[in-house]
Every structure is written in C-alpha cells, then in structure tokens.
C-alpha cells in the first residue's frame, strides 16, 4: 500500500449502512488502484489488508478453501474445547441471529468454521459464498474478514462491506471476538455473527464480545472444577512423599500443589511423553501419570501410585448429550444418557427395580433395564458399570450434579455457568423430568429474587430463553444505554408474538 495518505474513513457503523458501504467502496477502489492521495481504511483494516495481500489473496477471485468434509466434522467438533460452550453460544446468539437475519459461526484457532446456526433463508445465501462449516476463514485463506482478523489481532473486530478484502463479501457485514483457553491463555477460536449489509447494528460488537467473555467464564468454572477434582483424588500421592520435593500438575503443566512451598514454578514445560525432565532451576524430576495430570517428584524417591481411576465426564444440560471417558468421546443416544443421569445423581447405586421406576415410571420393568444396562456396558466397558447394585466405578464429573450442588449452596452464578441449557430436553423419563424442573425452576427463582442484571441476562440467554417474565424483569433493570437492551427487546417481542 502506498504511503503518505492522511485521510482515513472512520468506523461509522452507527450511520446508514448503505451510505457507509458506498464510502468504503471508494476507499477499496482507491487503495487497490494505487491512488496515493485517496482515503485510507481504518488502521485495523489497513494492517489486515497488508497481511492478506502478502499472503497472495486475490481480491477479485477468491473462495475459502474447504479443509473438512461433512464426514470429518463430527469428530473434529467433539474433540474441540469449544464444544463445551456451544449450547451457551447457541442460547445467547443463535436466536438473535435467527431474528435479525444473521448467521452465527464458531471457528477453531486456525479459522476453520466448525459450527453454524441462523435463519434458514440466510444459510442458503451463506452457502453460495462459502460461509459454511468446514471452510477456512483465516486472513491467509480468504483475506480480511471478522473471523480471520479477530484471530490475527486477538481482539473483537467488526468488518463492514468493502472492508472485506475479497469483493465477493462487500454485501456482508460481520462481527467476531476471540475465545481464550482459561488454562494457557491461548486462543481456542472465534465467535462470529455475519449477515447482509442492511443488518449491521452498532450493538453487535458489544454483544458478540460479551458472549465470548461469557464462554470464557464458563470454561474457567469447568477448569476450576477439574482442578479441584484432580487435587482431591491425588493429594495422597503428594503427601506420601514426606518432606521430599513433589508436585501435582495438570496435563498442560500448571502447578496445582507443590512442596516445599515456593520451590516449584507456576507452570512446568512438559514434553509430549514426559518421563524425566529438568526444571528451569536445573533440578531433575520424574513425571508419573495421573488421571488428568502428573505427579512430579525427585528421582531418588519411589512412590507407589494407586491404579488410575477412569474419569467420566457427562454434559447433559443442553440440546445434545455429550460424554467423555478419560480423553475419548462417547457417542450417546438419549436412553443411555438417561441411564447415566440416574447413576450420576445416585452414586451409591440403584437396584434394577429402582432404576426401572426412575426411567419408566410405573410401567417400567427390570428386564428392560437389564437390556439398557447391557448396551451401556458395551459402550463404556463392563468394569466401569458395576451391578448389584448398578453403579459407576469411575470419577464422574456431571454438569447436573455440579449445578444442583452449586444451587443448593447458594452459588447461583456457578450453577448458571454449569447450566447452558435444559437437561435432556427430549427426555420423558420421570427422573429426568423432575431434575429438569428442579434445576430450571431453582435457577429461575434464585436469579429473579437476586435481581442481578448480569445473571438475569445469562438466564435469558439460556434456560430462561422462553420465559417472558425473565425478559420483562431484565428490561426493567437494564440501563437505557445498555447495548443488551435491543436484542433482549427483540426476543421478548418474539415471545409475545
């Protein structure tokens, strides 16, 4: 790009979108034609154009490359950390996107689109320009766009009309914000809302940014829960070292507990398959694997570790039940998810008669239960699901149990973070119905009684998405200039209609 230009075009997202788009088209044409005296784009856009052109992106002829086909996407999605917060993102943004003719997109750190939601009519338009799951939207792949640029600058970004380097997207406007790993601080991906030119709204930047921060908070809560579980399960190994140096660290090398106090760094650099490693202070230590982390100790001390207990993670609060056994995702249908829910909330076990009553009510019988348990044992392993009584022989991390405990202890914010959606919404099992009503009703009462605006907004974007009273109360409390009022009002009007 030529030097010497001084006239910049401001970010006029609050003015007439079409007029602003025409002005930006003039900037685009001036810059690409080499006009040294013409206007220049905003600094963030100018820098992005330079990076994109350096990557040989053609402004006139470019479509995003497809990196995952539809058969690869399910496995990639299940393994990605943002799958944990997808129900929250959908509850917060997807309904707004549908109402306002936008699409919501979620990418990984490389800019590959993994998820998409939005109005059906607009999805057809999005397909025609390559805006669909499996495509790569990094700056190097498709030039300046909100998803790629937010990942490049690590900050929320709005790209409007001709600020896109590729001319195909001049009829689109988009806003994106990065989501970070609370453990390492690395970017996990981006959340984006895109739509036709006329749908631009000045509140979108604040809304998308707040949603990304909400997702990070949810991940932070889940990380804290996992840290505490690792400490509780493995502190005995550390104590058995006596006065010798030792530490419990996460898989990423973050210190959870160490002795002597102050001797260990806050984070240890772990190789891919650690056995012995040297710390920054020159000390050599042995690394022994634990479920979810590592025990580091002096090589002179031998510690006999108890057999690792399998870790079962259950995420059933939301539209799609998900489970992981240690690091392996499990493909669950509704019935095994119901069985696992019953066993998770009854850790001491259930008889066949009790399980039949909880899952089927008075019409249940133990023969049916035995068949369901048999199929579940084939899925997770016979050693993990014990009989007489039926119980889980694993460390169970269940969002249902976490939310119930937090709610009973008055930790409303934690309970809300653990509840991005309703418990198995399609289930009619008596136990699940009761738990669903208990959690949704308890959260509703606690948040409404507390009157905290932020908690109310989170409730309205999650389990209270269809609750008119929640939206009415939220509009009463939100200040007049709050950027959240517009989307909340739109959703409330939809409920009234």
Image: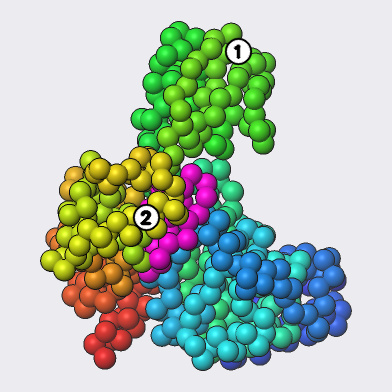
Q: Earlier in the sequence, mark 1 or mark 2?
A: 1
Does 293 sit left or right of 59 as displayed? left
Report the disc number at residue 415.
none
Tell me: residue 426, above or below residue 339.
below
Question: Which residue is at a point 29% across and 44% down the rendered structure image?
Answer: 387
Image quadrant where residue 367 sits: bottom left
Tell me residue 40's x, y (percent).
73, 75
- Density class for disc 1 (Cα within 10 Å; few <14, some 14-19, many ≥20) is few
**In the image, farthest residue toward the front:** 367
Q: Can the viewer see residue 449 in this picture?
A: yes
Q: Is residue 164 magenta?
A: no
Residue at mark 1 to residue at mark 2: CA–CA distance: 45 Å
Question: Which residue is at a point 59% across and 48% down the rendered structure image?
Answer: 186
Tell me residue 45's x, y (percent).
69, 70
The N terminus sits in image quarter: bottom right
Q: What are the residue bounds of the magenta stretch?
A: 312-333
Tell me: residue 472, above or below residue 206.
below
Q: Which residue is mark 2?
A: 374
Report the disc number at residue 299.
1
Q: Nearer the viewer, mark 1 or mark 2?
A: 2
The C terminus sits in image quarter: bottom left
Q: Can the viewer see residue 43 in this picture?
A: no
Between 434 and 252, the residue placed more toward the observer is 434
- Density class for disc 2 (Cα within 10 Å; few <14, some 14-19, many ≥20) is some
Secondary structure found at label 2? helix
Does 426 sit left or right of 20 as displayed? left
């Amino acid at each position: 790009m030529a030097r010497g230009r001084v006239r910049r075009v401001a970010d006029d997202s609050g003015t007439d979108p079409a007029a602003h788009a025409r002005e930006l088209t003039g900037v685009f044409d001036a810059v690409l034609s080499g006009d040294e005296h013409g206007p220049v784009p905003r600094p963030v856009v100018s820098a992005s154009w330079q990076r994109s052109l350096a990557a040989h992106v053609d402004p006139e002829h470019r479509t995003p490359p497809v990196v995952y086909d539809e058969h690869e996407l399910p496995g990639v999605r299940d393994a990605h950390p943002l799958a944990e917060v997808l129900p929250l993102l959908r509850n917060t943004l997807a309904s707004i996107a549908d109402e306002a003719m936008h699409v919501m997109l979620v990418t990984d750190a490389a800019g590959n689109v993994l998820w998409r939601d939005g109005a059906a009519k607009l999805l057809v338009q999005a397909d025609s320009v390559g805006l669909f799951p499996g495509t790569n939207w990094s700056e190097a792949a498709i030039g300046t766009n909100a998803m790629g640029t937010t990942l490049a600058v690590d900050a929320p970004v709005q790209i409007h009309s001709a600020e896109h380097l590729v001319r195909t997207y001049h009829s689109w406007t988009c806003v994106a914000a990065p989501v970070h790993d609370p453990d390492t601080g690395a970017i996990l991906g981006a959340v984006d809302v895109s739509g036709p030119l006329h749908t631009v709204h000045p509140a979108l930047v604040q809304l998308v940014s707040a949603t990304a921060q909400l997702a990070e908070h949810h991940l932070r809560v889940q990380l804290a829960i996992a840290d505490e579980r690792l400490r509780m399960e493995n502190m005995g190994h550390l104590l058995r070292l006596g006065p010798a140096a030792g530490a419990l660290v996460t898989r990423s090398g973050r210190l959870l507990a160490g002795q002597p106090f102050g001797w260990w760094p806050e984070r240890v650099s772990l190789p891919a398959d650690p056995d012995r490693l040297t710390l920054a202070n020159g000390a050599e230590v042995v690394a022994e694997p634990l479920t979810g982390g590592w025990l580091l100790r002096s090589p002179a001390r031998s510690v006999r570790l108890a057999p690792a207990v399998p870790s079962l993670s259950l995420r059933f609060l939301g539209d799609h039940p998900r489970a992981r056994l240690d690091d392996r995702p499990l493909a669950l249908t509704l019935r095994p998810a119901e069985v696992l829910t019953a066993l998770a909330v009854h850790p001491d076990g259930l008889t066949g008669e009790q399980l039949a009553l909880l899952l089927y009510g008075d019409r249940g019988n133990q023969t049916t239960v035995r068949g369901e348990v048999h199929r579940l044992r084939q899925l997770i392993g016979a050693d993990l699901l014990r009989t007489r009584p039926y119980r889980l022989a694993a460390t169970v991390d269940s969002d249902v149990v976490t939310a119930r405990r937090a709610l009973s202890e008055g930790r409303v914010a934690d309970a809300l973070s653990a509840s991005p959606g309703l418990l198995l919404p399609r289930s009619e099992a008596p136990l699940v119905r009761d738990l669903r009503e208990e959690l949704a009703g308890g959260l509703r009462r606690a948040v409404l009684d507390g009157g905290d605006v932020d908690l109310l907004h989170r409730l309205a974007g999650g389990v209270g998405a269809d609750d008119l009273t929640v939206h009415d109360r939220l509009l009463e409390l939100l200040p007049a200039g709050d950027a959240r009022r517009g989307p909340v009002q739109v959703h409330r009007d939809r409920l009234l209609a």
